[in-house]
Amino acid sequence: MKIAIQQREGGFTERWVAYCQKNSLDYLLVDCFSTDILYLFKKEKITHLMWHLNHASSKDLMVYPYVMNTAENMGIKTFPNFNTRWHFDDKVAQKYLFESIDAPLVKSDVFYEKEEALTFLDKSQLPLVAKLKRGAGSTNVKLIKTKAEGVEYIQKLFSEGIVPTATALGNFDQKLRVAKQIKDPIKLAKKTIGFFKKNKRERTLAHAEKGYVYFQEFMPNNDFDIRIIVVGDIAFGIRRFNNENDFRASGSGKLDFDVSKIDLETVRIAFDVTEKIGGQCLAFDFVYDRNREPKIVEVCFGFSMKAYDACPGYWKRDMSFVEEKFNPQNIMMEKFLKE
Ligand SMILES: Nc1ncnc2c1ncn2[C@@H]1O[C@H](COP(=O)(O)OP(=O)(O)OP(=O)(O)O)[C@@H](O)[C@H]1O
Ligand SMILES: [Mg+2]
């Protein structure tokens, strides 16, 4: 066995490497953007490939299918595997995924023709939730409250489109919150400069989203969303509260780790859907519909690593709760290497 791990600053990578070192596993940090990457896999006799895909990197999104699909063709096991990754950071793909297995997705509609989108808008009850395929932290999720707003949005998506990366100072509150957590001023200065550079690069390189519109039915009266993450055979979760006067919870930073408040139906759905999909690691966001039934709004392979360290425990597949500290990145590896 020889594990190739895509080099990435922060994220799951550092814990995967620590796991390999602790368990004396043969591993290699690799650069999947190198033009010779497949030759390297052959030369090094790589058996497993792991990549903590970054939703904020257009480069990751462009290149991962090339490398991971072909690695699989070469007999290399991949994490995330095909079923976990093909819909990564693509809410439109997820609509098809969930419909194919009858999962309880909030009613979602996609249109690839402007006229059809306008007709749909005309006969829809407002508000509607409009989303781009890409995005996190609610950046590209918007409430369409009037017909005029809807028409403007549709026109835009069928003309110049919308760049999915927020401007450097967009979502300022979220960024300020992250910055405040860095106590060392030199580190903060370095991170800030790094962030501005990365943001400029992303805004230049990201394709504008266009040629489609994606709407979801608006689920009213949700003060929070519920995020359940399934990793291997366990699940854990939190509630995220909305910012004041905002229907969106993601990105608010108002996290609640009290597991007694988590609706177990969401945990059951997350386990069932992951099993049906054949997923290795999936984070589901739920809100309630008008009948107080939980509905999925989206799913994602990755999640912020450190935030969930505060979870007091996890559920097993039989829905029993285990109150203990755990390391999801180790669990990923254990299960993946056993596959
Ligand atoms: N159809 C909906 N009805 C009501 N609220 C919704 C709906 N869809 C999303 N929301 C709210 O908006 C937030 C952002 O939506 P969503 O999770 O789809 O976007 P995101 O930017 O990809 O988030 P993440 O950071 O979790 O990846 C959710 O956390 C939820 O609170
Ligand atoms: Mg979300």
Image (cartoon, helix red, strand yellow):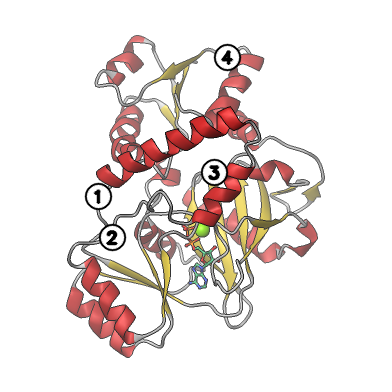
Q: Earlier in the sequence, mark 4 or mark 1?
A: 4
Q: Earlier in the sequence, mark 4 or mark 2?
A: 4
Which numbered mark, 1 or 3, is in the foreground of this view?
A: 1
At which x and y percent is residue 215? 37, 72
Q: Is residue 147 above or below residue 235?
A: below
At which x and y percent is residue 331? 64, 34
Report the amino acid beneath label 1: His
Label 4, ligand 1: CB separation under 8 Å: no
Q: Which residue is mark 1?
A: 207
What residue lies at 66% left-to-right and 49% top-to-bottom?
235
Q: Which mark is residue 25?
A: 4
Q: Which residue is mark 3?
A: 281
Q: Which residue is mark 2?
A: 162
Q: Earlier in the sequence, mark 1 or mark 3?
A: 1
Q: Residues within 10 Å of mark 3 (few under 14, many from 20)?
A: many
- Disc 2/disc 3 C-alpha distance (Å): 29 Å
Q: Nearer the viewer, residue 291 or 9?
A: 9
Report the amino acid beneath label 4: Leu
Q: Residues within 10 Å of mark 2 (few under 14, many from 20)?
A: some
Is 104 on the left-hand or right-hand side of 36? right
Q: Earlier in the sequence, mark 1 or mark 2?
A: 2
Report the amino acid beneath label 3: Cys
